[in-house]
Image (cartoon, coloured by chain):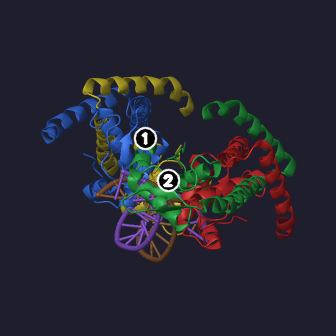
Chain colours: A red, B green, C yellow, D blue, E brown, F purple
Amino acid sequence: MITIETSGFIPIYEQIKKGIKSEISLGVIKANEALPSIRDLAAELVVNPNTVARAYRELEHEGFICTRKGKASFVSENSSSLIQKDKVRLMEDVFDRAISEARKFGLDAAEIRRIVESRLKNQENRGEGEGR
Amino acid sequence: MITIETSGFIPIYEQIKKGIKSEISLGVIKANEALPSIRDLAAELVVNPNTVARAYRELEHEGFICTRKGKASFVSENSSSLIQKDKVRLMEDVFDRAISEARKFGLDAAEIRRIVESRLKNQENRGEGEGR
Amino acid sequence: MITIETSGFIPIYEQIKKGIKSEISLGVIKANEALPSIRDLAAELVVNPNTVARAYRELEHEGFICTRKGKASFVSENSSSLIQKDKVRLMEDVFDRAISEARKFGLDAAEIRRIVESRLKNQENRGEGEGR
Amino acid sequence: MITIETSGFIPIYEQIKKGIKSEISLGVIKANEALPSIRDLAAELVVNPNTVARAYRELEHEGFICTRKGKASFVSENSSSLIQKDKVRLMEDVFDRAISEARKFGLDAAEIRRIVESRLKNQENRGEGEGR
DNA sequence: GTGGTCTAGACCACA
DNA sequence: GTGGTCTAGACCACA
């Protein structure tokens, strides 16, 4: 369910980290459940295992997952509360950036609202089919 | 007026490019006007001249500015129309990304609208003073 | 009585080896006495049998224990003298490392003595209850 | 000044991290001073640049150093206070481990003191010559 | 030249 | 099979 963009500037390991946080946030993977193995996820994403390993390692350092050697990585017990905080910060950040970008090009609040609406609609019309 | 973030993953030359497009878009610099020299802008942004040079070079390739050797770089005659197209695409892109990011974390349209409103207000209260 | 740390870098089989040497050294298990079976110890330590097997195998190679196929592992006849030598070397090693670590951070002999005293006291106050 | 043990179980990147913390602690490198470049240190330690890079990256995440891309890594402004805390924790840890190791082999406080004294003397006699 | 990311691939501890 | 470390080496952004 994680998608990787190789164009663009965000490192693959960051995209993996965000993808996993997203899955935890959505409840796709729940506390104490195992993540896919490094090798499996690497194969699925067509990415080097080292890159996945880095993502997992950083998620572990940040407390989202914990790893049992020889077994697998598991979503931490307290991941939900961590994710919750992280998510709020992340969402604020994402829209602050988008809005200040828009402001830099002279858009006012009304125009921003309008473009948000149009993109919301646009994604509804296109995107919904994919999930089914 | 251009601000550079050294943390984060977006290359500095990209930030400079976007900054200049923004200034053209806002009319801060108009068609046929000269851009600051590479050295001056580099000094102002506390950035290496090579980085500014790259931004200018790419803006030239994209037709936004034209550089006369030994002289300076000027905003192209047809920059406004180019910028206009670029701006629409850019804004759509920016909000598409923000919204799909939010969707990845399970936010629905109502929640997205709410967060956009809160960030719009938040930036009004803080940010406006800086521009004056 | 053996405790395993899964965080940290010392392999589990090494921790098991040291734990058994410790028990021989303390007389908890005496010469010619049987060690717990690999399966039992593995269960007790919540560790994979392979890992215990490796510890036993290496202890055998070093002469501390001997394994009779189909039966069990026994503490060797001459284990005490071996342990005695090993223990002296081990203790010197342990404190050499600790002290040189402290030296690397600029502590002088007086400061090292002081910290040793404080840790000795600290462990007395907390740790003694656990053993009983 | 950093020494790497390839025998033993502590990962090279950890040894590098500790070595650098030690140098900061000793004032060998001071706040705002540049660390050796990744490539240089890798060459000096006869280690892969990736390994040094990992050490630097983790030191950065922990706040001890900060990296300016294209330039170098620098000791953070607030490194001293961080190091101070880290050092205390580290020294307590080191001696707690050493002492509990000794306890596992039946040594009492008096014997531990004696062995500490003997190792302190031993290192004085051997080690001092090297520093000059 | 300097740091950052990524790949390919080896070897080890653990299950 | 699973994660962890390490090496060798490529390519990019930045100075």
- Residues at badges 2 and 1 in contact (C-beta under 8 Å)? no
- On screen, B70 above or below C3? below
Between C109 and A43, the one lying in front of the other is A43
Q: Is residue A111 left or right of residue E14?
A: right
Rendering coords of residue A73 (x, y %): 63, 57
Q: Dividing the picture into quarters, in which one does residue D110 lie?
A: top left
- Distance CA(mark 2)–CA(mark 1): 64 Å
Circle 2: residue type: Ile
Rendering coords of residue A70 (x, y %): 57, 62
Q: Secondary structure at mark 2?
A: helix
Q: Which residue is mark 2?
A: B12
Q: Secondary structure at mark 1?
A: helix
Could you tell me which residue is drawn at 34 percent across and 22 percent down?
C114
Q: Residues within 10 Å of mark 1 (few under 14, many from 20)?
A: some
Q: Which residue is mark 1?
A: C26
Q: Which mark is residue B82?
A: none
- On screen, A16 above or below D78? below
Circle 1: residue type: Leu
Rendering coords of residue D68 (x, y %): 41, 47
Rendering coords of residue D9 (x, y %): 40, 54
Between C68 and B76, the one lying in front of the other is B76
The number of numbered badges drawn on the structure is 2
Between A49 and A71, the one lying in front of the other is A49
Quadrant occupied by the C terminus of chain C:
top right
